[in-house]
């Protein structure tokens, strides 16, 4: 009889090992689970558990058939989900000490495995990926996935499960040089240079009572002393770079890299509290970072600056694609990846502009700003997708206008050609600065936005939506700020515009159809594929944009917008946090798909996905539904015909 039982257990094991999280569990442990599985048969419409029932001692997995999960609200029965072969349900007792939030019944004759919850305790402690999967799985059927209430609550009888430690370099604390050599502001440059030489260092911090005031590096001595601008007998305060860029002691490699990219400095000062008003404890140099970082985006940026033609830029951008691939494989946070790759894309565009000005042989006649719009404007362009850009130039007299515009159109044409060579293809809708429609003076841009905002017909909104995510890439910052501020001011005066914008964004329904099937394309070359960009990513981007415009925030990045919204509307913190998490998952997913298939990652073949990946995608759809509901209520979209 025992051998018979084992045969059944082995058959159960063969089934379980095909599905997450059981595919993550070693065979011996899984056999132990399989031996204790309870096999249940349910007839059509038979109830497995009801809403508000006390939790069972098992979680359930569908072996054969279909189970529907439902919830009663306001006297009506709502189907929440449909579970088919390999799907888990009834996870609540595993995660929360609470009664079932929903009921489960058989949609047709079904066989369901009951898996004892108490067997999971050791598994969870020893295999963190199992706990991560179960939490994600649980969150998909929870009203507010990722909310404070569920965070960290893994299992009722285990007090705390340690967070899986990240092992990748970017999130490690940067190793900085402790007790850096300092001097006071009145020290002569010669004395400082002697100290640097004696200690074999390439920088010295100028400090008073251990508070850092400035820094000089080899470069300062080369450019300010070697050139004869200052004398070696002058005090260091005359040539020091001040204020210094400071960070606290626990700065990560990622933060250090971003700070150095942003501030264009080679040294960061580490102080007790991270400000330049507290005691200096260390210095972090380019060399320190290079030691821990083999593939350094900063080196790519240096190469970009030295590039003499578009072909070189193309080669460097292909190295950046490798960098993205490595980051995604190491599961480095997507927010960090977008920042680094955006800096590289920005540097490439800057280089393309500078090379083009050189070719024309004539400096721009007036101040201008080169703008990225759409995904590059939001700093979310990780893959080589189409270019979307625009240009604004300073207002000029009518008599000069034609000549000035002709110059900028010539410049933009050269720049877009170079970006096309690099691999950013021309925009099919011609939303590029080389198009006279999108190469305008400041006055014309303000007028254009006014027209879009004051007469918000759907066609105009669909065309203009991309322009509400515009970011300065190169040129005059003040000019860019003036246009950005005037747009936010216009919207503040014309709040009805947001209702029209909301209505257009809601025309894109949540990605799940009836019975929680993925909405796939019905015809054409992408038939039966899931459009992850339009159906899942865009609704979250649109939602972040509309809330950001509503609050008058001059922030473009989707993750940063949600982060800010959590502060601005603390009562909706859970909603915005779940949207941010969903967006991160989707962007990572699209990027890895695009890198794997060498395309834009826009379409996903659902049938080729593992159960775990399907679940991961599904977990992102609830926040879309919830935030679209919030838009409907906030912006009264139903009142617009």
Image (spheres, rainbow, N blue to C red):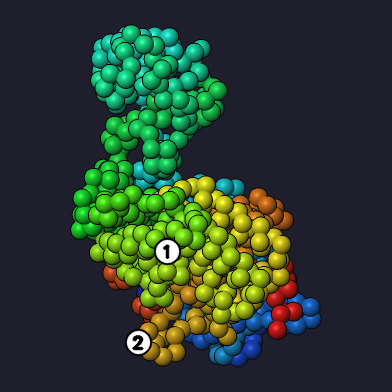
Element marked by disc 1? helix
Q: Which mark is residue 402?
A: 1
Identify whether 380 is placed above or below 45. Answer: above
Task: Tell me where residue 420 sits by quadrant.
Answer: bottom left
Mark 2 or mark 1, earlier in chain: 1
* Residue in view at x 73 percent, y 73 percent: 636
Q: Residues within 10 Å of mark 2 (few under 14, many from 20)?
A: few
Element marked by disc 2? loop
Which residue occupies the foreground of this view, 494 or 365? 365
Q: Which mark is residue 113?
A: none
x then y, percent, for residue 367: 44, 50
x then y, percent, for residue 268: 41, 30
Left or right, 425 with respect to 279, comes to: left
Identify whether 287 is placed above or below 630. Answer: above
Quadrant including the N terminus:
bottom left
Left or right, 366 with respect to 359, comes to: right
Q: Residues within 10 Å of mark 1 (few under 14, many from 20)?
A: few
Identify whether 370 is placed above or below 621. Answer: above
x then y, percent, for residue 481: 55, 50
* Residue in view at x 28 percent, y 69 percent: 598
* Residue at the front extreme of this rendering: 399
x then y, percent, for residue 413: 32, 64
Quadrant including the C terminus:
bottom right
Task: Mark yes or no: residue 268 visible.
Answer: yes
Q: Which residue is mark 2?
A: 525
Which residue occupies the foreground of this view, 544 or 305? 305
Q: CA distance from mark 2 to mark 1?
A: 44 Å
Task: Mark yes or no: residue 218 visible.
Answer: no
* Residue in view at x 25 percent, y 20 percent: 226
């Amino acid at each position: 009889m025992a051998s018979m039982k084992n045969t059944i257990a082995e058959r159960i094991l063969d089934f379980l090992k095909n599905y997450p999280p059981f595919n993550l569990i070693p065979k011996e442990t899984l056999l132990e689970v399989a031996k204790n599985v309870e096999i249940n048969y349910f007839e059509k419409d038979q109830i497995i558990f009801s809403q508000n029932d006390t939790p069972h001692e098992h979680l359930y997995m569908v072996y054969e058939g279909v189970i529907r999960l439902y919830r009663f609200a306001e006297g009506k029965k709502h189907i929440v989900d449909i579970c088919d072969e390999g799907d888990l349900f009834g996870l609540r007792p595993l995660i929360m000490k609470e009664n079932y939030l929903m009921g489960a019944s058989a949609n047709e004759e079904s066989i369901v495995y009951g898996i004892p919850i108490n067997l999971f305790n050791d598994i969870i402690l020893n295999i963190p990926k199992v706990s991560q999967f179960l939490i994600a799985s649980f969150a998909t059927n929870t009203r507010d996935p990722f909310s404070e209430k569920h965070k960290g609550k893994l299992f009722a009888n285990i007090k705390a499960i340690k967070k899986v430690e990240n092992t990748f370099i970017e999130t490690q604390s940067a190793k900085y040089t402790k007790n850096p050599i300092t001097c006071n502001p009145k020290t002569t440059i010669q004395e400082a240079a002697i100290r640097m030489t004696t200690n074999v260092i390439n920088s010295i911090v100028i400090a008073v009572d251990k508070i850092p005031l400035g820094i000089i590096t080899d470069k300062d001595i080369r450019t300010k002393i070697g050139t004869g601008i200052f004398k070696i007998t002058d005090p260091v305060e005359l040539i020091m770079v001040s204020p210094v860029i400071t960070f606290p002691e626990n700065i990560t490699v990622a933060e250090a890299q971003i700070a150095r990219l942003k501030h264009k400095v080679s040294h960061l000062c580490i102080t007790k509290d991270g400000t330049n008003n507290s005691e200096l404890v260390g210095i972090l140099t380019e060399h320190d970072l290079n030691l821990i970082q083999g593939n350094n985006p900063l080196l790519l940026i240096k190469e970009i600056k030295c590039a003499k033609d578009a072909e070189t830029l193309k080669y460097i951008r292909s190295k950046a694609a490798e960098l993205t691939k490595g980051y995604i494989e190491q599961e480095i946070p997507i927010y960090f990846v977008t920042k680094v790759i955006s800096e590289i894309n920005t540097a490439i565009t800057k280089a393309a502009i500078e090379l083009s000005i050189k070719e024309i042989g004539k400096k721009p006649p007036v101040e201008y700003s080169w703008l990225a719009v759409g995904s590059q404007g939001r700093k979310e362009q990780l893959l080589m997708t189409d270019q979307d850009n625009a240009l604004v130039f300073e207002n000029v007299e009518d008599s000069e206008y034609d000549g000035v515009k002709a110059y900028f159109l010539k410049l933009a044409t050269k720049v877009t050609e170079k970006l096309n060579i690099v691999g950013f293809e021309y925009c099919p809708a011609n939303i590029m600065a080389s198009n006279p429609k999108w190469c305008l003076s400041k006055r014309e841009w303000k007028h254009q936005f006014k027209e879009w905002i004051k007469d918000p017909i759907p066609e105009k909104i669909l065309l203009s939506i991309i322009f509400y995510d515009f970011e300065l890439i190169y040129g005059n910052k003040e000019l860019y700020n003036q246009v950005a501020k005037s747009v936010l001011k216009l919207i503040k005066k014309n709040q009805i515009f947001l209702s029209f914008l909301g209505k257009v964004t809601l025309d894109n329904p949540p990605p799940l159809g009836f019975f929680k099937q993925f909405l796939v394309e019905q015809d054409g070359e992408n038939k039966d594929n899931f459009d992850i960009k339009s159906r899942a990513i865009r609704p979250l981007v649109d939602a972040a944009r509309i809330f950001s415009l509503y609050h008058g925030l001059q922030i473009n990045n989707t993750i940063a917008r949600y982060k800010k919204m959590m502060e601005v509307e603390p009562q909706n913190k859970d909603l915005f946090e779940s949207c941010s998490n969903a967006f991160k998952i989707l962007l990572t997913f699209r990027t890895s798909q695009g890198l794997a298939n060498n395309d834009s990652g826009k379409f996903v073949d659902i049938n080729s996905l593992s159960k775990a990946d399907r679940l991961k995608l599904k977990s992102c759809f609830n926040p879309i539904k919830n935030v679209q509901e919030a838009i409907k209520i906030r912006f009264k979209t139903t009142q617009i015909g």
